[in-house]
Amino acid sequence: MSRQQKIHISTESFICVNCGRTVIPLDSGGKNRNHCPHCLHSSHEDITPGDRRSPCKALMKPIGIWVKEDGEWCIIHRCERCGILRTNRIASDDNEGSLLKIALAPVSALPFPLEVLSCKVI
Ligand SMILES: [Zn+2]
Ligand SMILES: [Zn+2]
């Protein structure tokens, strides 16, 4: 499967170029899907959100979770080609395991030994 192929983001079903699974449109309609609910990858489609005018079209990897002040989760996506960062709201059928894996990734790869924390407790 070519990495150059884009994820077709629309109201139609599409095959995710990252995990190869079929993605069906959201039941709720309205909002178009902007990432795969299984592996949470997206593609670099927009210059400003929703315009579909980016010439890049490369795969965007989910690299982190942003918890907004109201508690809503957003996925931080990073384009594998140009490195741009984007945030996208999670969808109701996003895979919870995949979301947790992204959220816990920094904790499972700490850049300092865990003992440092106990030393700093006053
Ligand atoms: Zn996928
Ligand atoms: Zn890009």
Image: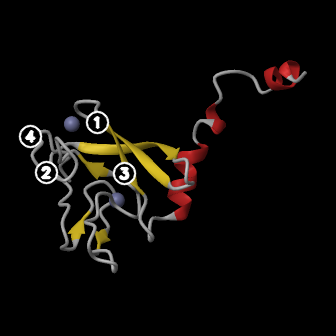
| Residue 9 x, y percent position in the rendering | 20, 61
Compute the Cα span from label 1 to label 2. 20 Å
* Residue linked to disc 3: 88
Tell me whether circle 1 and circle 2 mark residues in contact (CB < 8 Å): no
Give the mark nearer the N terminus: 3 vs 2: 2
Mark 1 vs mark 2: give the one in front.
Answer: 2
Could you tell which of marks 3 and 1 lies nearer the N-terminus?
1
Looking at the rendered structure, the secondary structure element under dot 3 is strand
Amino acid type indicated by mark 1 = Glu
To which residue does mark 1 refer?
80
- Dot 1 falls on a residue whose secondary structure is loop
The residue that mark 2 highlights is 51
Q: Residue at x 29, y 30 (%)?
A: 83
Q: Which mark is residue 55?
A: 4
Total marks in image: 4
Front-lying residue, 23 or 68:
68
Label 3 or label 4, whichever comes before in sequence order: 4
